[in-house]
Amino acid sequence: MYADEVLSDIKDDGTMPDNVDTLREAVIGHRIVRAERGPESVDGWGYRRRAPLVITLDNGQRVELRDTDECCAYTELESFLLHPERVDHIITGVGTTDGYSTWHIYADMGDVLELSVGWSCGNPFYYGYGFDIRVIELPD
């Protein structure tokens, strides 16, 4: 549905396509039950961190997308839009547009969830960037 974006070697070292692949592995074949901001956290230095986006899937797993920042490099979720009329459809893909600034989690009926993402590799590629994506498994 969305063509894979290709960025120059100066803009990205493969981090953004890897992030999209990680998200694809987590959500394709499932339905989104809920998408919401999780609780804020405090890092080891005592700084407040923005709450991650938590996507709850039909199997109970939660997929967390946490912002990252290191000096001048960062990736942050600016906003998200869930289309509740499409959540009953199984996710078939994840794509991006606008240079990885808009992420689309989609089903056969169109986008189920859209993410507006701000990001920069900073001083290429000295600092880390890209979402910290975690899949929280169900307890046994």
Image (tube, grey):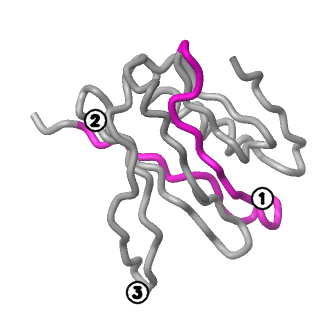
Residue at the location (58% across, 27% down)? 111
Examine the structure image and report whether residue 133 is included in the region drawn in magenta.
yes
Q: Earlier in the sequence, mark 1 or mark 3?
A: 3
Give how far apart the Cα atoms at labels 3 and 2 are. 29 Å
Regarding mark 2 in the picture, which secondary structure is present there? Answer: loop
Which of disc 2 and disc 1 is earlier in sequence? 2
* Magenta-drawn segment: 108-137
Who comes first in sequence, dot 3 or dot 2? 3
- In this figure, which residue is indicated by the disc labeled 3? 46
In the figure, 63 relative to 92: above or below?
A: below
Picture quadrant of residue 110: top right
Q: Where residue 39 sits in the image (x, y, percent)?
A: 32, 65
Disc 3 marks a residue whose amino acid type is: Gly
Magenta includes 117? yes
Q: Nearer the viewer, residue 78 or 123?
A: 78
Within the image, what quadrant is residue 2 found in?
top right
Residue 90, compared with residue 98, is above or below; it is above
Q: Position of residue 23 (x, y in %)?
A: 51, 35
Name the disc covering residue 61, or none: 2
- As drawn, which residue projects farthest toward the top? 108
Q: Identify the residue at image location x=66%, y=64%.
A: 74
